[in-house]
């Protein structure tokens, strides 16, 4: 058995590939394989299977795919290979020996190849690794964003391996073979400069100089036309090597892995990206047509001194003497460009999209680029990295000022910043104006006709930035801030470039850059876990890497275990005067008090997201005040709005916030628990009007200041579905804190969703509710929970467990004086007894339930009892009685009440008519039931009604509708 990711996602066996089915099932398999032997949460799988908003029944779809995948593996005798797909709480784990996964074998072969001293052995292992690829990674799967990132990472690894193989061939002197393996990839990836540089060098060393030069000019033109940039240092260095006729040390034997055979000579080139349209003019490239390079661009290639090729030959070709190193033209008399940039950040990783966005943003007229993001996300590093890689775009200089908008030391005076800029531009100290307005005017005047980059780092207010903006249309201003600075966007058309956390591959690459690649390769799972615990935040990752680098005996897994403890995680993410806590503290101290209070209370939120109502409940305010506070927190990038009215906290921000007011944790938790109870009761009342509440409120219930209104059933059901995971987290937090009276209620109040999606794995959650009810010794609570749990178990086909549980419920309800609860218990017990063949007992119990409901004058419970009584009478071959019970039940409720119940009653009525020989009326009622179910999205009801129809008619339309309803329940949806 073999699992494949390097090509079409598949499972190969001795009898052929397993029939995996639709693309989303392959996606699910791919997500599990990419985290083999590690739990993968339902949330992570949802992100992998859907690009946009997942359907409400995403969890059911995933469970259906898992069930089919598990059946396929069992049928292929996967257990004999040590393969097992298991469920762990709210996650799934695909356990398998790593030797069965092609991606793992690929990585293992690469690790072995890197350790070979003999290039012959390295070639064999690298060729074996590349032979595992059978097409683009993760083909045949629907790749959501996490899978797209994984496929991209795998492809990058493959391309690096091709370059490594070419380098190994070059070390053996087999330059034609190196060129051969590189050419195919260079054609497929024409703008990957490292491939083009390696191919040029291989061609040159194979004696094919003209081809090498042709490849350079082809690539240079493509970069200029498509991206508006000049060649980078790798391409320019390879070109210079060819022009010098320099074979390099041992003809490339000492070139670093993955770089082909590129050797760097003394010639300097101006390889970075140009300033949009202005920088793509060719000044930053080495060109045989340039008589003298422009000294302002930094492209000192000395082409004026280049000797001409002899007749009939090429420069550096056979029969000619290699040209001497080219002289560098003197810069005497040229003004030296101003450069106040700090050094380039070390170990910069990723950010390809953001760097490209900066380049695009810088291409306008007098552009102001605004890099925003939370503390520690790497805004300054991005700005400096971009600035350092584009020197030729700013021949008149680069200015930098740290505005210290989020510093303990306070912001510098604007006049001091302007003074530094003016002095750097050559203004004599005595000529610097004393007022901000005059100094700003002089600064704008001096920069009017210059091509200058101005970086304003850590700005807090738009007003601080405006006096520091240069005056030239060819000047670029790059501002970084933890705030959104919307005023700067409005007044100066600043172009936002938002910065988020790093992707997992970039996180591990950052770690490897500090602690060493060997340590990361030795513990890849622990490295990924560290990245997750740091939340993808570069500052946290650098602090973690610094701790590891200074302690070579520590393992990555050991530090991950320490970080896993939320109580001490922030402590471990601080080193000296640098750390996550310090960065967040500097952001928080700039906030108004109401926003600080809101943030502190959000730290005690047990869920993953919140809306203004939830935030208000946590803070003890109202939704209007909470919304204003959330807007301020979002402007400071302390919370993120993922959808209108839906917000999240980064994990490390949550931990910091929790420590701001630790003493308020219990009060905040009670507030949010009671908010959930009140809101879900409102949702249940809207979704299923007229019914008896599933419980009475606790005596000390704190009603929120405002409770969300639900316009209709669909809105209420959508809220219950969207909040399912957070309601479970809230119940768990309530249990942990000892608030069992809230825990069982929060779980039980989801009953409309339980009824609607009964086979959606509700039993574990309801069992937790039962534990809380028993912890309280509350017969009322225990009976209510058992009623719902027993019904769910019965629907799941676990009749024996259901009966054992439900037999206790009527007595508990009587003990608590809960007559309606007793009626419900009798109904649920009768349903299971019917399935076990105890029809007479079931009919008697259900009849007692009808009587109890009538005595209590509760039409809702009576309707429920009659619905089930009708089904039992039909099973007992008493269709007249079944029809009468169904009619009575339908008469109890208005037309719009409880779609699910109406559908089931209409279905029963239709089946009763069929049993009485009234086929036309029966088909009409069943068709009506199916239609109502389909319009309401009640797929289980539609399946039941259409199944009954197909037993008496072969109408193709019914078959088609039935198959579509089944597919909606179990397939991609």
Image (cartoon, helix red, strand yellow):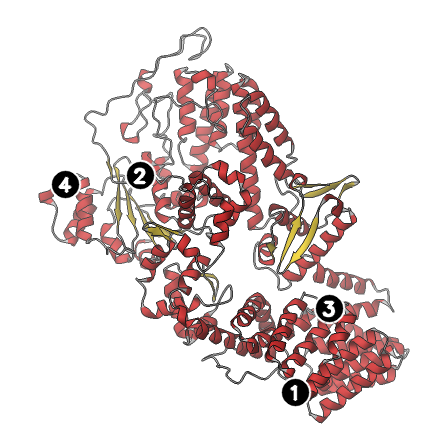
Residue at the image position 46 percent from the left and 48 percent from the top: 502
State the mark number for residue 940. 3
**Marks 1, 3: nearer the viewer:** 1
**Marks 3, 4: nearer the viewer:** 3
Tell me which numbered mark, 2 or 4, is placed earlier along the sequence: 2
Tell me which numbered mark, 3 or 4, is placed earlier along the sequence: 4
Per the model, the C-alpha gap separating discs 2 and 1 is 74 Å
Tell me which numbered mark, 4 or 1, is placed earlier along the sequence: 4
Circles 2, 1 touching at the beta carbon (< 8 Å): no
Counting from the top left corner in percent of width and height, residue 640 is at: 44, 60
> Which quadrant holds the N terminus?
top right
| Label 4 secondary element | loop
**Marks 2, 3: nearer the viewer:** 2
Counting from the top left corner in percent of width and height, residue 507 is at: 47, 45
Q: Which residue has dot 2 on it? A: 343
Give the residue at the far bottom of this rendering: 855
On the question of residue 941 being in view, the answer is no
**Marks 2, 4: nearer the viewer:** 2
| Label 1 secondary element | loop
Counting from the top left corner in percent of width and height, residue 613 is at: 47, 73
- 284 vs 318: above or below: below
Circles 4, 1 touching at the beta carbon (< 8 Å): no
Q: Which residue has dot 4 on it? A: 427
Q: Which residue has dot 1 on it? A: 816
Mark 4 closeness class: few <14, some 14–19, many ≥20 residues within 10 Å: some
Tell me which numbered mark, 2 or 1, is placed earlier along the sequence: 2
């Amino acid at each position: 058995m073999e699992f494949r990711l390097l090509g079409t996602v598949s499972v190969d066996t001795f009898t052929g590939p397993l029939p995996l089915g639709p693309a989303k099932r392959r996606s699910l398999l791919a997500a599990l394989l990419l985290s083999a032997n590690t739990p993968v949460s339902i949330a992570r799988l949802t992100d992998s299977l859907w690009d946009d908003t997942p359907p409400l029944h995403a969890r059911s779809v995933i469970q259906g795919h898992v069930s089919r995948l598990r059946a396929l593996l069992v049928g292929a005798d996967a257990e004999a290979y040590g393969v097992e797909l298991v469920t762990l709480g709210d996650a799934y784990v695909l356990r398998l020996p790593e030797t069965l996964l092609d991606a793992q074998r690929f990585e293992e072969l690469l690790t072995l190849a890197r350790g070979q001293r003999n290039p012959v052995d390295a070639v064999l292992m690298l060729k074996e690794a590349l032979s595992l690829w059978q097409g683009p990674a993760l083909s045949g799967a629907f790749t959501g964003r996490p899978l797209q990132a994984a496929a991209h990472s795998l492809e990058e690894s493959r391309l690096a391996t091709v370059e490594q193989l070419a380098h190994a061939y070059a070390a053996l002197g087999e330059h034609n073979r190196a060129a051969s393996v590189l050419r195919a990839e260079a054609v497929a990836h024409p703008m990957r400069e490292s491939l083009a540089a390696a191919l040029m060098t291989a061609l040159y060393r194979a004696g094919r100089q003209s081809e090498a030069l042709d490849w350079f000019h082809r690539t240079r033109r493509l970069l200029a036309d498509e991206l508006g940039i000049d060649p980078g240092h790798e391409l320019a260095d390879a070109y210079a090597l060819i022009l010098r006729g320099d074979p390099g040390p041992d003809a490339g034997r000492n070139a670093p892995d993955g770089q082909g055979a590129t050797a760097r000579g003394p010639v300097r080139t101006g390889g970075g990206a140009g300033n949009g349209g202005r920088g793509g003019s060719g000044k930053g490239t080495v060109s045989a047509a340039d008589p003298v390079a422009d000294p302002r661009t930094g492209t000192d290639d000395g082409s004026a001194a280049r000797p001409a090729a002899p007749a009939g030959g090429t420069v550096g070709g056979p029969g000619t003497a290699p040209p001497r190193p080219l002289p560098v033209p003197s810069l005497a008399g040229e003004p030296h460009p101003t450069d106040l940039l700090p050094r380039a950040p070390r170990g910069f990783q990723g950010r390809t999209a953001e760097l490209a966005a900066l380049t695009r943003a810088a291409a306008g007229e007098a552009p102001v680029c605004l890099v925003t993001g939370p503390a520690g996300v790497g805004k300054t590093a991005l700005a400096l990295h971009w600035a350092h890689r584009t020197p030729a775009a700013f021949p008149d200089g680069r200015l930098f000022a740290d505005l210290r908008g989020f510093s303990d030391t306070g912001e510098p005076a604007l006049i001091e910043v302007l003074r530094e800029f003016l002095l750097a531009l050559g203004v004599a100290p005595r000529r610097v104006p004393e007022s901000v307005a005059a100094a700003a005017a002089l600064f704008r005047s001096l920069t009017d006709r210059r091509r200058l980059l101005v970086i304003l780092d850590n700005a807090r207010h738009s007003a601080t930035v405006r006096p520091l903006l240069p005056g030239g249309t060819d000047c670029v201003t790059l501002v970084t801030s933890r705030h959104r600075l919307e005023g700067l966007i409005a007044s100066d058309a600043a172009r936002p470039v938002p910065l988020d956390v790093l992707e997992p591959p970039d996180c591990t690459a950052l770690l490897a850059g500090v602690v060493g690649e060997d340590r990361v390769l030795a513990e890849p799972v622990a490295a990924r876990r560290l990245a997750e615990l740091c939340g993808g935040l570069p500052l946290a990752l650098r602090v973690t890497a610094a701790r590891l680098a200074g302690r070579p005996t520590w393992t990555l897994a050991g530090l991950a275990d320490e970080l896993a403890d939320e109580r001490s995680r922030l402590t471990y993410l601080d080193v000296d005067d640098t750390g996550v806590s310090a960065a967040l503290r500097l952001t928080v101290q700039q906030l108004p008090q109401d926003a600080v209070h809101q943030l502190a209370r959000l730290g005690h939120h047990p869920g993953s997201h919140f809306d203004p109502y939830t935030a208000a409940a946590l803070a003890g305010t109202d939704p209007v005040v909470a919304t204003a506070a959330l807007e301020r927190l979002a402007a400071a990038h302390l919370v993120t709005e993922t959808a209108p009215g839906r917000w999240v906290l980064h994990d490390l921000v949550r931990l910091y916030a929790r420590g701001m007011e630790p003493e308020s944790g219990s009060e905040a938790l009670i507030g949010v628990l009671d908010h959930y109870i009140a809101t879900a009761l409102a949702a249940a009342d809207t979704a299923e009007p007229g019914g008896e509440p599933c419980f009475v409120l606790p005596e000390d219930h704190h009603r929120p200041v405002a409770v969300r209104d639900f316009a209709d059933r669909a809105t209420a059901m959508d809220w219950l579905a969207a909040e399912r995971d957070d309601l479970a987290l809230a119940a768990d937090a309530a249990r942990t804190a000892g608030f069992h009276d809230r825990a069982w209620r929060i779980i039980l109040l989801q009953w409309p969703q339980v009824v609607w999606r009964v086979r959606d794995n509700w039993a574990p959650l309801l069992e937790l509710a039962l534990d809380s009810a028993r912890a309280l010794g509350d017969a009322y609570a225990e009976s209510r929970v058992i009623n719902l749990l027993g019904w769910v178990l019965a629907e799941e086909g676990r009749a024996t467990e259901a009966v054992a549980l439900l037999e206790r419920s009527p007595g508990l309800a009587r003990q608590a004086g809960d007559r309606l609860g007793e009626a419900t218990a009798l109904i649920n017990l009768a349903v299971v007894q019917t399935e076990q063949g105890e029809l007479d007992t079931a009919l008697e119990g259900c009849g007692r339930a009808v009587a109890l409901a009538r005595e209590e004058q509760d039409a809702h419970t009576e309707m429920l009892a009659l619905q089930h009584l009708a089904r039992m009478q039909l099973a007992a071959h008493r269709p007249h009685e079944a029809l009468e019970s169904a009619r009575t039940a339908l008469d109890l409720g208005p037309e719009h009440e409880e779609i699910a119940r109406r559908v089931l009653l209409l279905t029963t009525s239709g089946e009763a008519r069929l049993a009485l020989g009234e086929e036309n009326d029966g088909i009409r009622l069943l068709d009506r039931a199916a239609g109502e179910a389909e319009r309401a999205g009640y797929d289980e009801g539609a399946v039941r009604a259409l199944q009954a129809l197909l037993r008496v008619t072969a109408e193709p339309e019914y078959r088609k509708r039935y198959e579509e309803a089944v597919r909606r329940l179990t397939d991609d949806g």
